[in-house]
Image (cartoon, rainbow, N blue to C red):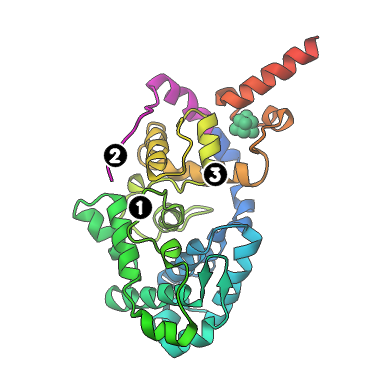
């Protein structure tokens, strides 16, 4: 994937943004928001391989409404017992049939999820962790886009026909585990990686020590895209890998070692409805970012002018 960065934050803009973003992140109610986020699932497990499997499953199904996918993940994990790592390492086609028969979540059917779980089980059996499957391509000099494609391909390397015979045809495998990754932002894979690599802190787990946080790309969704435009981190309107890369590189001018540490508080600023698609002066008046936000600054100036007249 070519590295294109059309908007580069100036040093003075980065210096202006840094203290505001840091104060915003420090004061954000992140601990309280974990329960509204799929990161709640891997955070339940003490063992690394259990958190990896719970995280991969939760991140992969984390699309659509939170109240749509959370019960699906909850149900599957409850049936996988206390150790989902050991569960998938021992999983076979009859076991997948017992676990997943009748499973449907939007684009995905039982066979899609069975491929993911059987694939994760195989990777765990071979290397004891999912980490080397991403870390080793990066260590060989591949970029993150290529490394994630290889990870996704390795997960999908599962014989499909026996699963189709047991559970019916696959439907949304390319959506669940894209190969190739394509031009999209790969939000769910980048989110899984953020959980595994960053931290540990009140949100992320910091389990994977061989990948530096500086190698991460922001998990780009509509909230991050909207707020990033408002803060001048991008002008791009699409949810592409290039946009994710541009935002990440501009955040790296604020914190080079850990650019995606702002992802969770910014995303939940949008998800919680405070920073809504249609900005509201009342919300902006109490926002830590108002002095560096183009939309907030304009709205508050307009409200002030209206009050004078
Ligand atoms: S000032 Fe308003 S529009 Fe800007 S980030 Fe804050 S809440 Fe969102």
Q: Which residue is mark 2?
A: 3
Please state which of the two labelled residues, at mark 1 or mark 3, is closer to the viewer. 1
Crowd band around label 1 with a 10 angstrom C-alpha radius: few (<14), some (14–19), many (20+): few
Q: Residue at x 53, y 53 (%)?
A: 202
Q: Residue furthest bottom?
A: 94
Q: Considering the image in quadrants, where does the C terminus appear?
A: top right
In the depicted view, which residue is nearer to us: 297 or 110? 110
Q: Residue furthest top?
A: 309
Lower position in the chain sequence, tag 1 or tag 3 = 1
Which quadrant of the figure has residue 162?
bottom left
Q: Secondary structure at mark 3?
A: helix
List x then y, in percent, for residue 133: 29, 64
Q: Residue at x 23, y 52 (%)?
A: 142
List x then y, in percent, for residue 33: 62, 52
Q: Do the numbered discs 1 and 2 sit on residues whose CB atoms are within 8 Å?
A: no
Q: Residue at x 45, y 90 (%)?
A: 94
Q: Which residue is mark 1?
A: 182
Distance, label 1 to label 3, CA atoms, is 18 Å
Q: Residue 113, can we see it? A: yes
Q: Which residues are magenta?
A: 1-22
Q: Residue at x 48, y 36 (%)?
A: 237
């Amino acid at each position: 994937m070519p590295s294109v960065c059309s908007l580069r934050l100036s040093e003075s803009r980065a210096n202006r943004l840094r203290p505001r973003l840091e104060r915003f992140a420090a004061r954000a109610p992140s601990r309280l928001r974990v329960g509204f986020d799929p990161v709640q699932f891997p955070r339940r497990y003490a063992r690394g391989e259990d958190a990896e499997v719970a995280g991969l499953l939760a991140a992969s199904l984390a699309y659509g409404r939170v109240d749509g996918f959370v019960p699906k993940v909850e149900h599957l994990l409850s049936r996988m017992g206390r150790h989902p790592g050991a569960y998938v390492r021992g999983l076979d086609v009859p076991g997948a049939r017992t676990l997943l028969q009748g499973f449907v979540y939007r684009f995905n059917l039982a066979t899609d999820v069975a491929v993911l779980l059987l694939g994760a089980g195989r990777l765990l059996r071979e290397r004891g962790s999912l980490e080397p499957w991403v870390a080793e391509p990066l260590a060989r000099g591949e970029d993150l886009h290529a490394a994630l494609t290889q990870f996704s391909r390795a997960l999908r390397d599962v014989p499909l026909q026996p699963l189709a015979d047991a559970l019916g045809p696959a439907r949304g495998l390319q959506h669940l585990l894209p190969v190739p990754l394509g031009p999209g932002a790969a939000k769910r894979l980048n989110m899984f990686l953020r959980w595994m690599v960053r931290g540990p802190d009140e949100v992320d787990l910091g389990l994977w020590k061989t990948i530096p946080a500086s190698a991460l790309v922001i998990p780009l969704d509509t909230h991050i895209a909207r707020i990033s435009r408002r803060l001048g981190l991008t002008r791009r309107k699409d949810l592409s890998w290039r946009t994710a890369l541009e935002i990440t590189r501009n955040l790296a001018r604020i914190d080079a070692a850990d650019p995606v540490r702002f992802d969770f508080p910014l995303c939940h600023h949008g998800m919680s409805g405070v920073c809504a698609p249609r900005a509201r002066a009342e919300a902006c008046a109490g926002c830590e970012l108002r002095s560096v936000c183009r939309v907030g600054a304009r709205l508050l100036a307009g409200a002030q002018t209206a009050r004078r007249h």
